Image (spheres, rainbow, N blue to C red):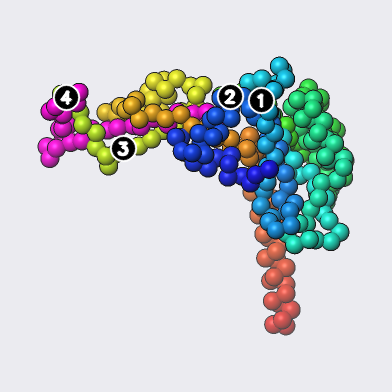
């Protein structure tokens, strides 16, 4: 059980990244479960359960399951320091079942006209969304997703641009392997993270050359890294309210304030 830092701390080649790389390339990670905040006595931070195994079942090999159990909690009747939440037995059973079945799933939260939660349902892959309550809403978010190990890997490439003299001409090397080749300008050096599944050359042509036609990749400096952006894989965009609704709310507030001021000056 760890905090969130081991999921992403450290760039390619760092100690933290190399540990993640070893675990994922050797297929040791079965699943990672995100827990609610305020679950422990002396800290309120987010925590994650890493389930590791060197004896993965055949159907799990080469894959990692992420389970988002952040919303699976109930408020304690009496807080214990920073511990204000607990997972009831039914929520623990849901997480256990999702892990045991190695299933992708979504969580549907049904609310009434006031926005209060009335029920929630766990939907397995292929199951339809529940009916919307009269005057209420249904919010559906993923809670269990399965990825190939290599999805979390990337290459950090070093992008160089030429050093130029006072006349604006590229400075060429004079000795050894660099002879006759443009010399890199350290001030213009940059890096790009390219997913392992993408071809580096295609990425460079598409994302870099249109903005810096004179750039090139120093392949000797390329490093492989791994990170697990847990929250990003469960993010669901919610569009803002229409401007007309926001304007109407503002008008109601300003009208109420104006009425109160008029009452004071009467």
Whether label 2 touches label 1, CB < 8 Å: yes
Q: Tell me which numbered mark, 3 or 1, is placed earlier along the sequence.
A: 1
Q: Tell me which numbered mark, 4 or 1, is placed earlier along the sequence.
A: 1
Q: Say whether residue 233 is magenta.
A: no
- Label 2 SS: loop
Question: Tag on residue 26?
Answer: 2
Give me the C-alpha separation between circle 3 and circle 4. Answer: 22 Å
Give me the C-alpha separation between circle 3 and circle 1. Answer: 41 Å
User: 224 and 121: which one is in front?
Assistant: 224
Give me the C-alpha separation between circle 2 and circle 1. Answer: 8 Å
- From this viewpoint, is residue 181 visible? no
Q: Which residue is mark 4?
A: 176
Question: Tag on residue 189?
Answer: 3
Whether label 4 touches label 2, CB < 8 Å: no
Task: Say above or below: 250 vs 11.
Answer: below
- Label 3 SS: loop
Would residue 24 appear left or right of 234 to someone viewing this image?
left
Q: Position of residue 50 (x, y in %)?
A: 67, 36
Whether label 4 touches label 1, CB < 8 Å: no
User: 248 and 50: which one is in front?
Assistant: 50
Residue at 53 percent of width and 30 percent of height: 21
For the magenta stretch, what is the residue range? 151-178
Q: Position of residue 101 (x, y in %)?
A: 79, 25
Q: Tell me which numbered mark, 4 or 2, is placed earlier along the sequence.
A: 2
Q: Position of residue 173 (x, y in %)?
A: 16, 29
Q: Say whether residue 158 is magenta.
A: yes
Q: Which residue is mark 1?
A: 54
Task: Say above or below: 257 vs 192.
Answer: below
């Amino acid at each position: 059980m760890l905090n969130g830092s081991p999921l992403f701390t450290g760039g390619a080649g760092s100690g933290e990244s190399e540990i993640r790389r070893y675990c994922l390339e050797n297929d040791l990670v079965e699943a990672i479960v995100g827990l609610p905040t305020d679950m422990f006595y002396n800290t309120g931070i987010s925590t994650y359960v890493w389930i590791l195994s060197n004896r993965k079942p055949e159907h799990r090999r080469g894959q990692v399951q992420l389970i988002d159990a952040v919303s699976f909690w109930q408020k304690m009747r009496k807080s214990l320091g920073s511990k204000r939440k607990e997972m009831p037995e039914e929520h623990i059973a849901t997480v256990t079942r999702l892990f045991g079945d190695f299933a992708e799933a979504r969580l549907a939260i049904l609310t009434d006209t006031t926005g209060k939660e009335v029920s929630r349902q766990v939907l397995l892959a292929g199951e339809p969304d529940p009916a919307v309550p009269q005057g209420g809403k249904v919010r559906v978010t993923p809670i269990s997703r399965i990825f190939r190990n290599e999805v979390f890997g990337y290459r950090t490439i070093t992008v160089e641009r030429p050093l130029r003299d006072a006349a604006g001409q590229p400075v060429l090397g004079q000795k050894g392997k660099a002879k006759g080749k443009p010399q890199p300008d350290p001030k213009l050096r940059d890096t790009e993270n390219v997913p392992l599944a993408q071809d580096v050359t295609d990425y460079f042509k598409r994302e870099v050359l249109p903005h810096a036609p004179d750039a090139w990749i120093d392949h000797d400096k390329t490093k492989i890294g791994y990170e697990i952006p847990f929250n990003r894989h469960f993010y669901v965009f919610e569009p803002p309210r229409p401007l007309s609704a926001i304007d109407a709310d503002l008008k109601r507030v300003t009208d109420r304030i104006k009425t109160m001021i008029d009452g004071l000056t009467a």
